[in-house]
Structures are given as C-alpha cells and as structure tokens.
Amino acid sequence: MDNRKYNIYFHTHTISGIIICALLYVIFFAGSFSFFKEEISAWQKNTSYVKGRKTVIRDFDRVIDSIGQKNNLKGRDLIFFIQRNDLGTYVSITASADTTLKKKVEPKTEGAAKMRSGRGRGGDDDSMYFSYDFATQKSGDYSEAYDMGEFLYRLHFLAQLNAVPIHLGAPFGYLLAGIVSFIFLFALITGLMLHWNKIVSNFFTFRPWSKWKTLWTDLHTAIGVIGFPFQLVFAITGVVLIANTFLIVPYSKYLYKGNSAALYQDLEYSDTTKFAYTYQPLQKTVAINALVENVEKKWSHSRITGVTIKNYGDKNMHIIFSAKPLANKSFAGSGKIVYRVRDNKILTEVSPVQTSSYVDKIKSTLYHLHFGDFGGKPLRVIFFVLGIMGCLVIISGILIWLVARDKNNVPKAKRIFNFWTANIFLAATLSMLPVTAFTMLSLLFIEKSNQSDIFHLYFYSWLVLSVYFILRRNINITNYQTLILSAILCFLLPLSDGLLRKNWLWTTFNDGKFDILFIDILFLVLAILSIVILFKIKQHEKLKSVSK
C-alpha cells in the first residue's frame, strides 16, 4: 500500500474513531447487557419468567374484567403487545367508537402534559396505556413498570437523550445514535483497509510484556480482527434500525402524502384495519383465554406477539392474533388470524412459517442479527462477549492514540489537550461497570422502584464517579480503582441477592429460576475477571520495573 492511501485510511480511521468513541462505548456496553434484558428484568423483580412459563396462566379475561369494572369498554379497541418474556404485556385501550359513550375529557394543562414521559399514550381522548405482569398479576404505567433491563436496552440507542429539546426530523437521542452507527462504519472499513496487508501477521502477533503502546496496539488489532464481522453486522443493522425513525419521514411526506399510518401498514409495523361500529350489542360472551390457547396449539412452532380486540362488546367485534415463528423453525415470517366473534368465523389466516413477504424477510433478518435471538442463550452469551470485546477495542484505540502523541516533540498545549481528552473518556467509560453493578445492587433495597429511581441512581452515581476520576488526573488510578470497585460491587450483587432474597446459586438452580441464576453468575464472573485483570496489570508493571 502506498503512503498516500495509508495516510488516508489512518487519519480517517483515527478521526472517525475519536469523534464517536465515548458514545460508541456506551452503545456497545449497554447493548451487550441488553442481550439479557429479560433476565435482568426477572432478577430485579425477583420473578423467574423461565419458571413462570411452565406454571403461570396468561389470564387475558381477568385483565379485561378488571378494567371493565372501572371503565366502560364498549366500542373500544383493546391491544395487548406481549413482551418477549411471554408473561408481560403492554395494554393499549383506545377511546370508544360509540359516540354516545365518549367522555368529555378536559384538556390537560401545559404543565401536566410535560409530566408525562416515556412510552405512555396520552391525549384528551379517554385512551389508556399501561403494563401488566401475568406472573405477579400487577399493573402499572410505563414509569412504574420500568426496570434495569429496559433502562440498559434504551440506553444502547441513547433514548434517554430524547429529552434534549433538539428535533431535526427525529428525537435527538435516536438521531445521534444513528449518526454514531454510520460513522462507526467508516471506522471499521478504514481500520480493515489499514491493516489489510499485514492482517494475518498482525493478528498472530501479541506481546503482552512489551511497553504499553505495543501491548495496546497488539490488543487493538487482534480483538478488532476477531470482532470485525460482529461489529460490521451491528453497525449496518444499527444504522437501519435506528435511522429508519428519521429516514421514514420524507417517504411519509412525499410518497404517502403525509399518511404515515398507511406507510407503517405497508411496512407491517401496525395493522390499521378498521371494522364498522354497528351500535348493536354482541349477543354472546367470548373467552379470550380459550381463543389464545387454540391459536397456540395451532401454531406451536410460533409465539403470539399480539392480541387486538376491535369494537369490544359490539356485534361487529373482531379479534386479531399476531404471531412470529420461533427462530429454529423459520428465520422470517409473521402470522395473523382475523376472527369474527358473532359467528365464530375466521376471516383471514396466514401461517407464520408458510409464507413471508419481502418486507418481513428483511425486517426479520435485521432484528434477528441485531438482537441475537436466533440461537438461544449460548449465542447471546457469545454476542455479549463480542460486545465487551468491542469496548476493549475502543479503549485500546484511545490509549494508542494518547501514547503515540505523548512525546517531547509534540507541543505542550497539544499534549495537555490529548491527556485531558483521554482522561475524561476513560473516567466516563470505565465507570460504567461499577455504576451498573451499584445501581442493580441499590435496587435490592428499594421496595417499589420506578423509572425515576433508576435514572437518579445510575446517572448521579455515574456523574460523581466520573468527576472524581477526572479530577484525580491519573489514568492508572482510574484503571485500578474502577477494577477494584467493579470486583467488589459485582461480587456483592449475588451475595446480597442470597442474603436479602434467599436467591443463593444452588437455590435458584434447584427451583428452576435459571434467569435469576444467570444474572448472579454473570456478575460473579465479571467480579472474578476484574480481579484477574487487576492482577495481570500489576504483574505487567512489576516485570516492566524489573526489566528497567
């Protein structure tokens, strides 16, 4: 490779990496833990969904009866969005189509409107939106049902930054995450081109006892090559999944004449099918549980993802069942049954495994590759490890950049700027593991935690720890102390779970609570790894001092 091309690849790779390094680390770190979103939620709520799938009955009729005791459901649409753990659901209830029953709802004040946040559906139309857990038989709004799994999942695409009052065609957090993913593609491709000529020799070269720059360079190259396919897949799928929130706007405006509902219908994100409201009562009762059970038996190779009840209590009441095939049965596909209640007739039936549209194949491929849900827990563990390796690639890249520029021929002002850049980056990023463990540990002592509690615990502790390490102005201290804190807090997590909730490893194993067991083991392993890494670093320092 000639010098001109080498310099272009080198500077493009370095600059693009430096620009996005902090946010990319957050995305990779939070995204890695998001592979275990359901397990983290189960651990926090002390409710095993793995065990519950075998024992808990999803009683949709009970939920509907409970709501009906407080609200007139006649003419409403009831939509159940079933969560991936199969025992939780988001429930959306529209205003009644019966104009004689519609409530006259007073408009909310501007201050009250601002109090609403998260996914909750608001407005002045008597609609409702809440979550329900079939295992605990408890309901709550989005804030009350918010947990650490949801927090880390949303952090990995910077959803918390949507509160920033900047809207350029999309919420600020989503827009920023999309831009970071796009720039990450440049860093990956230019990094590959940079090492292309010596990719094999560099991959098999690792000198752990050499000087720090050599160690970080070897680590950056070796891990970068191992994780390149994984990172490339996540960069591409991340761009598509995140960027579609703002790329879809011009299509909706120009091709669909502003009719976004029609666009989402064509993309198979929603079903806007309408059934006429007849103002005539349904002359029979219907058991939703029995219908769901029949669909599950018919489609044993799939999981029901949604149940929609149209025109509840009306003669023209319909029930729509949505399903997705299990990944080991079909990589793509979506099922749908439209059931008319008055005469027990199935109007439409599309099997999840027999037919799939082009749109569905593309969507399914993107989702499966991004979420790693097509190979069971072993694949998610592999994806987790590769995600953490991505974090190491980012850290080693920053340290290479710092060491290479910490020379006497570099002006003092530039050296100071370079140091503070690396110092702030490492303080903020290396704090994430102890902060995550601290937040989860703290939630054990809060009886009914909500979104606000998690936000305060995580962001305030992250800010305090980051500022502390920034002010110490010593990267070695940052490295050592974050490892020590990580080891202590990650070890305290399974220990406290055992002491406070009797969830000892052998107890959860015998009880079949494998999701709770998995999280305790995961943090125990992270504690051991932190100790091992700390020991290896000190061993490296001793060998360096002896060699001098």
Image (tube, rainbow, N blue to C red):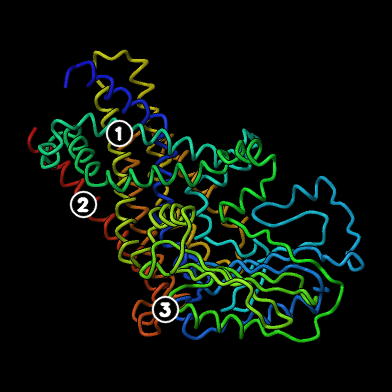
Q: Which residue occupies the foreground of this view, 231 or 148?
A: 231
Q: Given this view, does label 2 or label 3 mark the residue nearer the observer?
A: 3
The residue under label 1 is 189
The residue under label 3 is 513
Vertical arrangement, residue 233 with respect to residue 97, above or below: above
Crowd rating for badge 1 (residues with CA inside 10 Å; few <14, some 14–19, many 20+): some
Vertical arrangement, residue 467 with respect to residue 402, above or below: below
At a point 80% along the width and 73% down the height, the residue shown is 73
Tell how many labels. 3
Mark 2 or 1, nearer chain start:
1
**In the rendered structure, which amino acid carries the disc numbered 2?**
Phe
Q: Given this view, does label 1 or label 3 mark the residue nearer the observer?
A: 1
**In the rendered structure, which amino acid carries the disc numbered 1?**
Ile
Which label belongs to residue 535? 2
Percent across and percent down for residue 518 are 37, 70
How far apart in space, not on screen, are marks 2 and 3 (Cα)? 33 Å
How far apart in space, not on screen, are marks 2 and 1 (Cα)? 35 Å
At a point 7% along the width and 36% down the height, the residue shown is 547
Mark 1 or 3, nearer chain start:
1
Quadrant in which the C terminus appears = top left
Q: Would residue 217 be visible to someone looking at this image?
A: yes
| 217 left or right, relative to 119 | left
Q: Which residue occupies the foreground of this view, 188 or 385?
A: 188
